[in-house]
Image: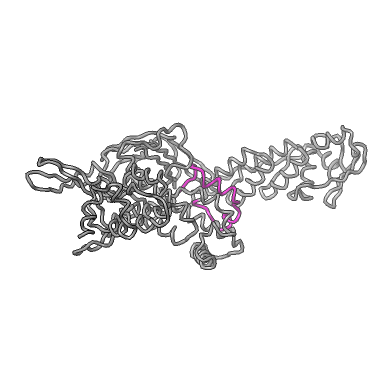
Amino acid sequence: MCLRWLLDNMMTQCSDKLLREVSLDLMKEVIASSELLVQERFGEHPFRGDRAGQSLRASVQQLRFAYIICDPTSARVIHQDALIPAAWLCPVYKECFLGPLRAKQTRELWPVDVYVSEPQGKSMRCGVQLHKQKQCSWPWEGFSFSWDLVVCYANQHIIFWYSAPNKSYSLGGSGKRKRGPGGPLTKKPRRKRAQDRSGSVEALFLRGEQSDVRIRALGEEWNVHRVYLCQSRYFASMFRGAWRETNMDTIELQMPDENIDREALHEAFGALYRGSIFIPPGRVVAILATASMLQLDELIRQCGEVMKVTVRAQTVCSYDYSAESYRLQTVRTMCLRWLLDNMMTQCSDKLLREVSLDLMKEVIASSELLVMGVEMDVYTMLKKWMFLQLQPTWRGPRRALLPDTDSWFARSRRDSEGTPFVETEQGRAFVPVFQQLRFAYIICDPTSARIIHQDALIPAAWLCPVYKECFLGPLRATTRELWPVDVYVSEPQGKSMRCGVQLHKQKHCSWPWEGFSFSWDLVVCYANQHIIFWYSAPNKSYSLGVSLLEQRKFAFRLRLSSLDRDGRAVFRKDTGYQRLSLREDQELEVMNLENQYVVFPIHVACNFLYLH
């Protein structure tokens, strides 16, 4: 009877005297019970009594946090009070966010069965006090499945009423897209060949006739002429300054750059006599290194031109590192552009071995990355890249790379006793790269979230705030809070959803793109050289979620590109970031390709930012 009294009166007669007298064990029993008569609208608020001491831990653990964090204000109070460890809330946010997605995709119900009694500690507790005999009604909202239950009291009857969907919110999911092969053949650019200006060049340079200085380097000697060498700022400074080599007949050169070899040095000296030389792509890095040391501006320019027209999978990484070392910014920009266009479609094991940590971080962080699929495909590619960086001797067919990667990390996980890989000694170097992933667009899919958990590459501490934001974001949207507040020319860093698809032929087709947590199901149609967005209604076959809002506002950026056999763009079109508002079943043309020569296959990529 005493326990029954406390269950009936603890929330309404909780005077300071009563709260002082309730022991820890008794409070634990009261809070754990589903019989507790809760008279708060959001009934799981913590008690306002003595909050200090580890001895209160067992009682506080009986709270049903899933029904506290569902309200943004209550969640903020929990955070500000700092009574509860974050580790307690992380699995709650995760389950609250993923639970609706599992129910949506697999129709699994939770709890599975309800008999005479409930599953221990699972039910939501809430209540209200009626003071007079009069008609009234009040809502009780579910925490993550978006059921809004209105309760009515009228004429001594209590009625439950399930409110209309457009008064609530829901959580959505994402899907994966297949990736296709590379682009069509295109004509290769012509290489520039230089011709000898006269037969005297042969005599002066190759035979060294009338030479007035000898250059010795890398075990080789060249009989050359000061008047030609002075075209180089390196030699001009040497011969005209107060240096000991100024009047020497034989000059010993020390090579500070390991990229310089005898052949490259010979070509650089020849360029002083011929004006320009033929530079094959396989030799351009060595010649650029030599030209940079000798300060041959024209030869540096020629090397840059050759690199620009020969960027491909076999050269992109070496060109990028050389362009950075020798300050060819335009070449480096082109290399980064190539990687952003091709990293997701031409990620061979050879290319993945060559991409450095800093370069991969820059690629993954960029919203320009051409994602053919969804963000989970970026994670999978990074996992294979990390494996090849750690095991560069791996050889095998392409289809075996992912299974071998998973097996290797599984062994590492067992050896480290479950420590997340990026927190191990081997994995710490990869932390800055994996931090560039947009986890909000990975965990929205239960299958992807399960893979992330099973791989154990990522610490749970990284994902806790993501689950929290993905769960609370829709709740804020119901109060008309906007995110992001403003979209200007560019997006907030790393905020947009990246997705894409490849169209192989000129034919009518359509596909869905689903929002990550606001359940907007956007159908994209390509027909007659037009691309159309269509916001599907909940009862349409394309809708994978429960899209409850009548109108969706978002910013998008649609990009089309066609790539040639070497991965260079032969066609691009970009809408830039635009704001868009769509109602149910509304269609809107976002791109018109009429009177434009489009080479198939084309890559259709989009960045989305949800506004409310």
Residue in the picture at 77% in, 40% down: 271
Look at the image and tell me whether residue 522 can be seen: no
Q: Quadrant of the C terminus?
A: top left
**The image quarter in which residue 578 lies:** top left
325, 286: nearer the viewer: 325
Q: Is residue 289 magenta?
A: no
* Side (left or right) of 386 relative to 470: right
Q: Quadrant of the N terminus?
A: bottom left
538, 400: nearer the viewer: 538
Residue 384 drawn at (x, y percent):
52, 58
**The image quarter in which residue 72 lies:** top left
Look at the image and tell me whether residue 492 can be seen: yes
* Side (left or right) of 315 relative to 537: right
Residue 586 drawn at (x, y percent):
27, 38
Q: Residue furthest left?
A: 155
Residue 523 drawn at (x, y percent):
32, 44
Residue in the picture at 40% in, 59% down: 450
* Side (left or right) of 194 relative to 134: right
341, 271: nearer the viewer: 341
Q: Which residues are magenta?
A: 344-372
Residue 184 drawn at (x, y percent):
49, 48
Q: Measured along the vertical axis of the image, is residue 562 above or below residue 26?
A: above
Q: Measured along the vertical axis of the image, is residue 494 above or below residue 378?
A: above
Is the image coloured rainbow, by chain, by secondary structure, or in one colour?
Answer: one colour
Q: Measured along the vertical axis of the image, is residue 144 above or below residue 230?
A: below
Q: Is residue 369 magenta?
A: yes
521, 74: nearer the viewer: 74
